[in-house]
Amino acid sequence: MSVFSHAEFDQHEHVAFFHDKQSGLKAIIAIHNTNLGPALGGCRMWPYANDEEALCDVLRLSKGMTYKSAVANLKLGGGKAVIIGDPHTQKTDALLHSMGEFIDSLGGRYITAEDSGTKVADIAKIGARTSHISGVMACNEYGGDPSPTTAFGVFVGLKEAVSYRLGRSDLQGLKVAVQGVGNVGFRLANHLKEAGAELYVSDIFSQNVERAVSQLGATAVSGDDIFGLDVDVFAPCAMGAILNDQTLKQLRAPVVAGAANNQLAEPRHAEMLRDKGILYAPDYVVNAGGIIDVYFQRSGGSQVDLASHVAGIGETLHEIFDRSEADNLPTSVLADRVAKERFENVKSPWQAPCSVTEDDPAATQSYSKSA
Ligand code: NAD
C-alpha cells in the first residue's frame, strides 16, 4: 500500500496509523493542511474491506475538510479520522478511550467530531482521554448537533442562488423540491415554508414524508419523480452522487442548492449542469453551516456571531457565481479555486509556538513563560 504516491495523497502534512492490541483499535488520522489552524474533521467508524480502502477514504475526506473550512472563512485546517471496524459490533469504551489517547498524542493538531458510525456519546467517550474534541454537548449555548445551523446555512445559500439566477429576493410562492427530509432537509423545508415557498418532498422513510406533509403542508412526491418536477429549485438533502447522467436528463429546476455531500457523481457533471443553464450552488460551500457550528462550539462566541458567520456563505457564493460567469467555468471549479486562495500561502498565528527562534526574543519570552 503506497502512501506518499497514493492517488489521493495530495500533499498531506501528516498521516498517522495507530494500533492498540488490547482494545483492538486500528485507526488512521490524516491531516491534510494546517495553514489556517488545527485540522478539524469527523471520526468515521466503518468496516472497511481492507486497509487500502480506509486510507483512500481518510485521505479524500481530510482534503475535503481543508477546502470546506477555508471556503467558510474558518481558522481551521482539514483532517479526518477513520476507525476500521463495525460500529454496531466492535465499538467498545476501551476502543474509544484508546482512540482518545491516539488523538491526544498529536498534541492538538487534529480535533475530532462525530461522523458516520460515531455519535455524540462516542465523541464524549473519546473526550475522556483528550480535550481535542468538538460537537458534543458543550458548555455553551449551541449544544452538540450542528444540523440546525447546517439547515440555516443551506437556506442562506439557496436564497443567494435564487437571487442570482432568478433575480428575486423573496421566496413567496417559489417552488422547491427537497429530496430527503431528515435532520437537515426537514429544517430547511421549515425555513422555506416560513418564507412562503411551496414545498415538494421525497424520502425513502415514509414517516419523514408524513411529517413534512402534516407539519409543513408539503406535497409528497414518490421516489425518482422528484428530479423531473417543474420547480424553481432542487434541494438534494439525502445522499451523494445525486447529480449524474440519469438525473441530469430529468432535472428541470434552474437552481440546485442542497445539503447533501458530494452531489456531483463526477466533476464533468458540473459542466453538464452549466450547459443546461442550471445554477449549481457547490455542496461544500452551501452545507458549511455544520462545520461553522462545530468551530463556534469550541471557540465560543454568541449566537449573533454564529448567525453572521453563516450569513457569509451567501457572500462567498456570490463571489463564486460572479467568477464562474467571468471565467466561463463551472461553479464547482471556482469554489475549489476560492478555497485554495484562502488556505494556500497563509500561515496562521496558531502555529507560532512551534516556530519560535532565538532571533525573536519577545516570542521566546512568551513561549518560555507558558512552558
Ligand atoms: P439524515 O439521515 O437525518 O437525513 C437524510 C434523509 O434522506 C433521511 O430521512 C433518509 O431517509 C433520506 N433518504 C436517503 N436516501 C434517500 C433517497 N434515495 N431519496 C429520498 N430520501 C432519501 O441526514 P442529515 O443529517 O439530514 O444529512 C443530509 C445530508 O446532508 C447528508 O448527505 C449529509 O452528509 C449532509 N450534511 C449534513 C450535515 C449535518 O449537519 N447534519 C452537515 C453537512 C452535510
Image: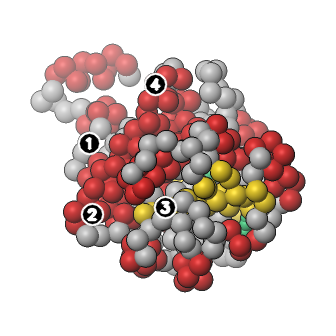
Q: Residues within 10 Å of mark 2 (few under 14, many from 20)?
A: few
> Can residue 53 be seen from the camera position used here?
no
Q: What type is the residue that disc 4 sits on?
A: Asp
Q: Residues within 10 Å of mark 3 (few under 14, many from 20)?
A: many
Which numbered disc, 1 or 4, marks the residue that appears first in the sequence?
4
Q: Which residue is mark 2?
A: 325
Q: Which residue is mark 4?
A: 305
Q: Which residue is mark 1?
A: 347
Compute the Cα span from label 3 to label 2: 15 Å
Q: Which residue is mark 3?
A: 255
> Element at badge 2?
helix
Mark nearest the camera among 3 and 1 is 3
Say whether marks 1 and 4 touch (CB < 8 Å).
no
Compute the Cα span from label 2 to label 1: 31 Å
Q: Residue furthest front?
A: 173
In which quadrant of the rendered image does the C terminus lie?
top left
Which numbered disc, 3 or 4, marks the residue that appears first in the sequence?
3
